[in-house]
Amino acid sequence: MADVMTAEERIVATINLEPVDRVVCAPIIEQYAGQFVGMTNKEFLWNWDKAQEAMQKVWEAFPVWDSNAYMLHGRIGPVATKCGPGRFRMPGKELADNAQYQIHEFEAMTRDDYSIIKENGFMEYRLTFLERAHQVNREEVLAGMQEMARLRQDEIDRSQARGQSLTWGAIMGVLPFDNLSMTRSMDRFYKDMFQIGDQVEELLWIINDAIIAGCEAAVKTTGNNRVFIGGVRGAGQFIGKKHFERFVWPQLKVMVERLAEKNIVPILHFDADWTKNLEYFLDLPKAKFVLELDSATDIFKAHDILKGHCSIKGDVSPALFTVASPSELDEYAKKLLTTFRNGEGLMYSSGCNLPMNAKHENVKAFFDAVEKYGRYN
């Protein structure tokens, strides 16, 4: 059957919990695209045009992929190694030519560096972190950010030329809790939480304001009112309810409420297991955010609790793409696509990134499932 909605109409209706002609198909496709066309990951991550041509080939093979959850502008070698979210180890440099990139976490910022946030603001703290993480100077960090913005616009232009919607206009980083955890390193930050909790709390609010302001600026730049906000380390998998209610939930709730007032829709890309935290999301404004799950959270429980409240994005797992058979992936996709009824806001996706080493026949099964089980018209 032919589509009767545009990709943009479909994603907007899905977020609004309105009926659609078919499910939104929005996997995160990154390094897999290079493998799909037979190039090394070194070539893919160091040659922007070739990488984008590979993305185009994936779309040509599977045009049912109607929403591009693009991330490559922050992962491509020249950008990742100057202002990526941590210290990258890249194929063709520290790693073999066809290895997947790695992000190496270490204590780049000390407890003493927290004073930078209070005295000079979060952006100064972030820039200092990037200088240390990548061992580059301020000019190189800023040049990397400029290049990243240029490449993001290219990803936007190419996606729209294909008729895809943009899953988000801008990737705004992560929740304040994760911001500090990533810059301090996880174990150090958890100690800070216990030992200097009052100070941490104060900083989280400063960062929250900075992220909200950043979202507003990004929406003006990209012309798209959806923003990516990541969260991992504040999940119930890692911290108890008491600390979640003190260090994660207050900022998250205020962020979503304030963005909703400005008609900005956060796509909460929440990796790890949030199953214990799902009921909290009922306190966020209805149909004003998307909860994106990576297959660690029980998406069926999320559906039970949150159906009729928010759109949910996910969640075909890496294992189903890499070690399962195509029929096993198909079986899971059928369950997912038929559990959510039309108007219940499913965005059909990979659980986080589609794995670089996904089997091609399983990727085909993933896309084929849209026509088999995800069409309503």
Image (cartoon, rainbow, N blue to C red):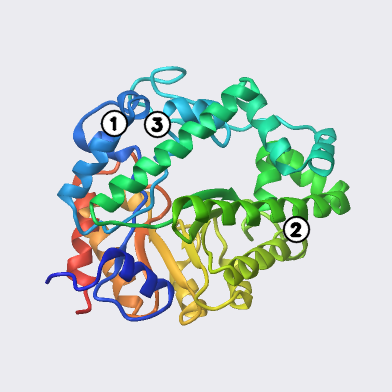
Instruction: Nearest to the eye among marks 2 and 1: give it.
Output: 1
User: Is 63 placed left or right of 314 in the picture?
Assistant: left
First along the sequence among labels 2 and 1: 1
Query: Which residue is most to the top?
Result: 93
Q: Which residue is mark 2?
A: 247
- Name the residue at 68% across, 37% down: 126
User: Is 323 placed left or right of 176 in the picture?
Assistant: left
- Answer whether labels 3 and 2 touch (C-beta < 8 Å): no
Q: Which residue is mark 1?
A: 49
Numbered badge on residue 100? 3
Residue type at mark 3?
Gln
Residue type at mark 2?
Phe
Residue type at mark 1?
Asp
- Name the residue at 53% across, 65% down: 264
Q: Give how far across and how far down residue 167 sits, in percent.
A: 39, 57
First along the sequence among labels 3 and 1: 1
- Answer whether labels 2 and 1 touch (C-beta < 8 Å): no
